[in-house]
Image: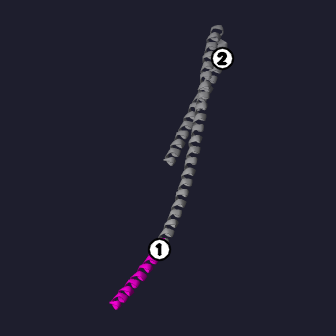
Amino acid sequence: LETRAKSELRGLESELRDVKQETIRTTDLRSEAEASLNQHEQRLEKIHEAYRTERKDMNKQCSESISAIEETELHIHRTRTARATELRVSEQKIQEIEEQLKVVLSEQEDIEQKTKDSILSSVEGLVRHKDWIVQTLTTLSDKATQGREGIESMCS
């Protein structure tokens, strides 16, 4: 009986050593897993930080581009308004010149021809100026629209 108890005690002691060794291995594996997890979490945080920084930079660039487009559009609008005003003034001047021409026609035929030539020359110049203004505004508008579409497509 005593031998049997000693034998069981040795068996139990052996099992206890095995359990202790397994506990040590499990603790080591757990420590390695935690260290690996910490490394992965640190890498993930660095990736997130890089993503946030890149996104912030992209948002800043988009905002700057949109501001530049809005400023350009405002400039175009102001230019259009100024050109339209110039055109109205030019058209009013044409009307005034035509009225003066009628008065001159009634007074002298000789002066009529000279005045008519002068007015026609002014009208042609104003028409060329008007055509140039319209062409310039159209070109500016087309370029602004293309630029805006390009920026919007880059930001999308």
**Along the viewing direction, whichever of 33 and 154 lies nearer the viewer:** 33
Furthest residue to the bottom? Answer: 3
Looking at the magenta stretch, what is its main secondary structure?
Answer: helix
Which residue appears at 64% of the width and 13% of the height? 100
Which residue appears at 35% of the width and 90% of the height? 2
Image quadrant of residue 73? Answer: top right
Residue 136 appears in the rendering: no
Q: Quadrant of the N terminus?
A: bottom left
In the picture, the disc for residue 27 is 1
Q: What residue type is labelled 2?
A: Thr
Whether residue 115 appears in magenta in the rendering, the answer is no
Q: What residue type is labelled 1?
A: Thr
Furthest residue to the top? Answer: 107
- First of labels 1, 2 by sequence position: 1
**Element type where label 1 sits in the image:** helix
Which residue appears at 51% of the width and 66% of the height? 38
**Element type where label 2 sits in the image:** helix
Q: Is residue 43 above or below residue 2?
A: above
Where is mark 2, residue-wise?
115
Residue 93 appears in the rendering: yes
Labels in figure, total: 2
